Amino acid sequence: MLSRCLRAALGGVALLASSMAFAQIEHYPSEQGRVSVEDVVGGLAFPWSLAFLPDGKRMLVTERPGRLRLVGLDGKLSEPLEGVPEVFASAQGGLLDVRLSPDFEQDRLVYLSYAEAGSDGRAGTAVGRGKLSADLARLEGFEVIFRQQPKLSTGHHFGSRLVFDRDGNLFVALGENNQRPTAQDMDKHQGKVVRIRPDGQALADNPFVDRQGVPPEIWSLGHRNQQGAAINPWTGELWTHEHGPRGGDEINLPKPGRNYGWPLATHGINYNGQPIPEATGEVVEGSEAPHHVWVESPGISGMAFYDAERFPAWQHNLFIGALVDRSLIRLQLEGDEIAHEERLLKELGARVRDVRLGPDGYLYLLTDSDDGQLLRVGLEAD
């Protein structure tokens, strides 16, 4: 990896093409061969998410303090794009996920999720969209299409990930703002997955659309702090994962109208070592058991299924970043079942915030720090 000293010497120069990009490849052991890691660009301030543009050579990267950057595989890093909404940049809050419209090549719409301040000093997750300008310098006509209501966060548990399904509808995976009971409150968006049209309208076949007092966007409930979401490319089903408290990180396959338990059901305890006050067991009547659970929390974030042809050994694997464990988690799938787990890149010691599959078949990782990196990860035979 490029040293911090070298990055500091290069820092502060707009539109800099890093002469070291792809010049250094490091290798790390794995069960399937040597994992290669290339440093594409550094100097990112707590990068949170990325989305490739259709040319496959450039991507949009969010920085949590509120900046959206254009990054090239040649190491070029743009000035922050204009037209990005003001964000609540405090603690875990800020600019979060980014997704392109399924019809981006026609409408050029970019979707963002972010922490939005309220009038009383608290905040909640919002989702909006704007048109990427022809010169790639700004988002035009940005509009908010969804707001988490009410706004309850003082800086924690915003979630959030954005996922378009095969029909072009948008799932938003939300946190419970560190207000545990709200994940079970049906009049609130906290701790829910919501499902909306690309313009923000609720769908007529959502499970609670006809229930009085329940926001019609709600798809599932009982979630804590959802930091990963993706559509399974082989089944079309939504997968999400969420942080547990002290222990109990979990993967779920949210189904319409189902309750995933938090805080009534959990495999974790409070950070002070005491039980979760509302919890009555690991699974409770009326809630769904996790599809997969880590009793010891790796601090999971980001999620990508591998269905590319470049590295056959990674086919039917699911990759998840780990913030606390400082690794890339590889889950080998047999159908929907998790057959095997491997922790990769622990030698890097990096908090992995996001992982995405690139159009070239490589994995792309974002590391969570004030000098964050975009890394390109592949697999080579021993």
Image (cartoon, rainbow, N blue to C red):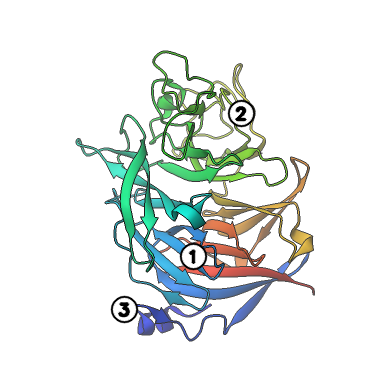
Foreground mark, 3 or 2?
A: 2
In the rendering, at what x and y percent does residue 252 appear? 61, 36
Instruction: Identify the mark at residue 59; answer none if there is no mark.
Output: 1
Outermost residue on the left side: it is: 119
Q: Determine whether the residue tagged by mark 2 lies in a helix, strand or loop.
A: loop
The location of residue 92, given as percent across then percent down, is 37, 49
Q: CA distance from mark 1 to mark 2?
A: 31 Å
The kind of secondary structure element at disc 1 is strand
Q: Earlier in the sequence, mark 1 or mark 2?
A: 1
- Indicate whether 97 appears above or below 327: above
The residue carrying mark 3 is 12
The residue lying toward the viewer, choosing from 311 and 121, is: 311
Looking at this view, is 160 or 347 the one in front?
Answer: 160
Name the kind of residue labelled 3 in the image.
Answer: Gly
126 horizontally vs 108: left or right:
left
Q: CA distance from mark 3 to mark 1?
A: 20 Å
User: Which residue sits at x=55%, y=35%?
Assistant: 268
Looking at the image, which is closer to me, 136 or 116?
A: 136
Instruction: Classify 10 Å Cα crowding around label 1: few (below 14), some (14-19), many (20 and above).
Output: some
Along the line of sight, the residue nearer the viewer: 85 or 47: 85
Residue sitting at 58 percent across and 26 percent down?
Answer: 256
**Residue 294: quadrant of the picture:** top right
At x 61%, y 27%, the residue is 282
Residue 351 visible to the viewer: no
The amino acid on which the numbered mark 2 sits, given as a three-letter code, is: Lys
In the rendered view, tell whether residue 285 sits above or below residue 202.
above
Q: Which residue is mark 2?
A: 255
